[in-house]
Structures are given as C-alpha cells and as structure tokens.
C-alpha cells in the first residue's frame, strides 16, 4: 500500500463546481441547499479517517430528506466522472496523483478509476468529497465492493490517511519446489498494535495481494534463471547471494515493501535457492 498526498480541494467548493452545470433550476436549488451537510460530513470523515474510526460513520438513506442517494450518485457520474463535465478537472487531478500511475491499494496495477472509500451507495454526502475518492486500478475497485466495515480491523487502508511505508511489513518465503516459487505475507513490526496488524492483513486479503505478488514473482524468477546460472557456473553460490542482496537493496531504496524487495531478500537468504534451487524448472 502506497501513501498519497492528501487532496487540498475544499469539499464545498468541489460540490459547487459539480452542480454548477445542473440545468434543472429546482434540482440545482435542492442540491445547493445540502452543501452544509456535505461539508459537515466531509469534516467528520476527515476526523474519523485520521483516527481509524471510519467504521463508526453511519450510512444514510438520503441527505436530510432533501436529496436522494440516486441524485447524489448522478452528481458524481454525470457532473464529475463524465468527460467534459464541470467537475471533471477535479476527477482528472485525483486520478493523476499516484507516481507512475500505480494503484496505491495494490502497488502494482495501473490506475484507471476513482474508488469511493466509503461507498456512495451508503454515504450520499461523500459522493464527490475529494478525500473520499481514491485513484485505483479496476481490480482493486471491484474487490472492495460496497461492503461497510463493522470493526476497526475490517477497514482497508486509506492512502491519504494511513502511512505504513516507513515500516517493513511485507515478507516472502521461498517454497522449495520445482520450479521455486514465493509465498507473500504480512509480517508486522513488533511495535504495531494488534489492531493495526489486523487491518493490514485484512487489506492484504481483500485485494488478494498474496496471489498478485506470487504471480509477478513467478515470472521474475523465470527471467533471472539464466543470469543466476551464469553467475554460479562462472564463480560460485556466494556470487549468486551477493547479486541477490544487491537487487534487494536496490529495490528497498525505492520501496521497502514492494514484492520485489521482499522477493530478493527471501531469495538471498535461502541456501537452497542460492545453491542450485534456482536451476530447477
Ligand atoms: Zn490496485
């Protein structure tokens, strides 16, 4: 999971921008009348997200009995997500935030959409609130569904609020098989409390990151076989170990929790792999 900078856009201003293009005057007036509700819920969201308490926010059927869920859903799809709409510049800005266009939830696939962290199907006031909109890949967006967390531990991580980048928490084990493969898991640092560890494990599970990383690692293992054989045959197992540690350090300098960092660390630490396990195919 990668951290993203918090969007600076003001919730009220973004909402006004989105509804500016609504031609039906009566609908526009009704929408404008709930701006204060939207701003209040955006502030409540900010506080709850920064204290990992989003599961305590109650779902709503409509906004103050004035604007329906489907009307707010239309504000998002017609006035923000739609190309050429008045709110689209905000949508594009949020979408473009991640480095190299990588999805912050999986850290692997390409960003293609915005995900409502608290789903608009249950939280109409948050439908166009920037801090509730996360740029994600299509798979992560689908995996999250409209489920609502019931406990602190069931909340997936929020890239604007949760930062676990400075701790090393992703680990891989070498499976001594033909061919060699890797198993990825969350290995929480000792100073994390149980609730934080459970949340990260939940995130890992919801987005099926173990399978995603294992599949990419399998391809990488096949690709490095020739190189390792050459190193081993021209020198020895020590040369293989040294090469793998260098790769691990190089990857860790960019991201200590990438599957590549975890993979190279695991491979370099495996006597079985460095002494010929890499040859088996
Ligand atoms: Zn993703």
Image (tube, rainbow, N blue to C red):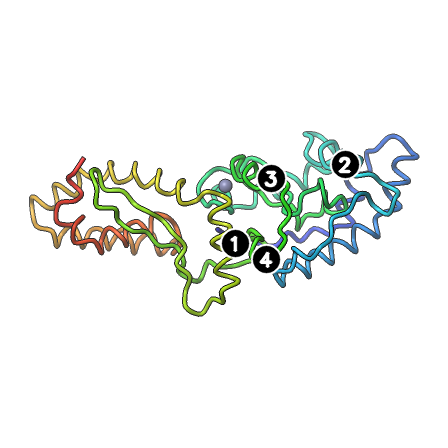
| Alpha carbon separation for disc pair 2 and 1 | 28 Å
Sequence-first disc among 4 and 2: 2
Point out the frontmost of discs 2 and 3.
Answer: 3
**Residue hosting label 1:** 3
Q: Position of residue 91 (x, y in %)?
A: 65, 39
Using a 10 Å C-alpha cutoff, classify the residue at mark 2 as few (fewer than 14 neighbours), some (14 to 19) or many (20 or more): many
**Residue hosting label 3:** 145
Sequence-first disc among 3 and 4: 3
Q: Position of residue 214 (x, y in %)?
A: 35, 42
Q: Relative to 19, say whether 152 is above or below.
A: below
Q: Secondary structure at mark 3?
A: loop
**Residue hosting label 2:** 75
Q: Is residue 93 left or right of residue 59?
A: left
Q: Quadrant of the C terminus?
A: top left
Q: Can residue 149 be seen from the camera position used here?
A: yes
Point out the frontmost of discs 1 and 3.
Answer: 3
| Alpha carbon separation for disc pair 1 and 4 | 8 Å
| Alpha carbon separation for disc pair 4 and 2 | 25 Å
Q: Is residue 159 left or right of residue 30?
A: left
Residue at coordinates 56% horizontally, 36% vertically from top-left? Answer: 142
| Alpha carbon separation for disc pair 1 and 3 | 21 Å
Using a 10 Å C-alpha cutoff, classify the residue at mark 3 as few (fewer than 14 neighbours), some (14 to 19) or many (20 or more): few
Q: Secondary structure at mark 4?
A: loop
The reply to whether dot 1 and dot 3 touch (C-beta < 8 Å) is no
**Residue hosting label 4:** 161
The reply to whether dot 1 and dot 4 touch (C-beta < 8 Å) is no
Residue at coordinates 74% horizontally, 58% vertically from top-left? Answer: 43
């Amino acid at each position: 999971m990668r951290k993203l900078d918090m969007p600076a856009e003001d919730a009220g201003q973004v909402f006004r921008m989105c509804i500016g293009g609504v031609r039906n005057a009566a609908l526009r007036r009704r929408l404008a009348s709930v701006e204060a509700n939207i701003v209040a819920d955006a502030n409540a969201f900010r506080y709850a997200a920064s204290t990992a308490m989003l599961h305590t926010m109650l779902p709503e059927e409509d906004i103050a009995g004035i604007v329906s869920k489907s009307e707010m859903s239309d504000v998002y799809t017609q006035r923000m997500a739609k190309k050429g709409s008045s709110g689209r510049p905000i949508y594009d800005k949020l979408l473009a935030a991640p480095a190299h266009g990588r999805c912050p939830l999986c850290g692997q696939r390409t960003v293609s959409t915005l995900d409502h962290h608290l789903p608009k199907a249950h939280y109409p006031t948050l439908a166009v609130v920037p801090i509730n909109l996360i740029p994600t890949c299509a798979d992560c967006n689908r995996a999250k569904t409209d489920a609502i967390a019931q406990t602190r531990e069931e909340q997936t991580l929020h890239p604007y609020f949760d930062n676990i980048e400075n701790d090393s928490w992703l680990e891989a084990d070498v499976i001594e098989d033909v061919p060699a493969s890797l198993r990825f898991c969350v290995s929480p640092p000792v100073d994390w409390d149980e609730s934080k560890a459970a949340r990260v494990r939940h995130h890992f599970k919801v987005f099926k990151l173990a399978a995603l990383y294992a599949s990419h690692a399998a391809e990488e293992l096949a690709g490095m076989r020739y190189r390792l054989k050459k190193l081993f045959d021209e020198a020895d197992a020590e040369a293989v170990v040294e090469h793998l540690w260098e790769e691990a350090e190089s990857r860790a300098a960019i991201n200590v929790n990438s599957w590549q960092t975890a993979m190279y660390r695991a491979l370099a630490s495996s006597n079985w792999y460095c002494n010929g396990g890499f040859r088996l195919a």
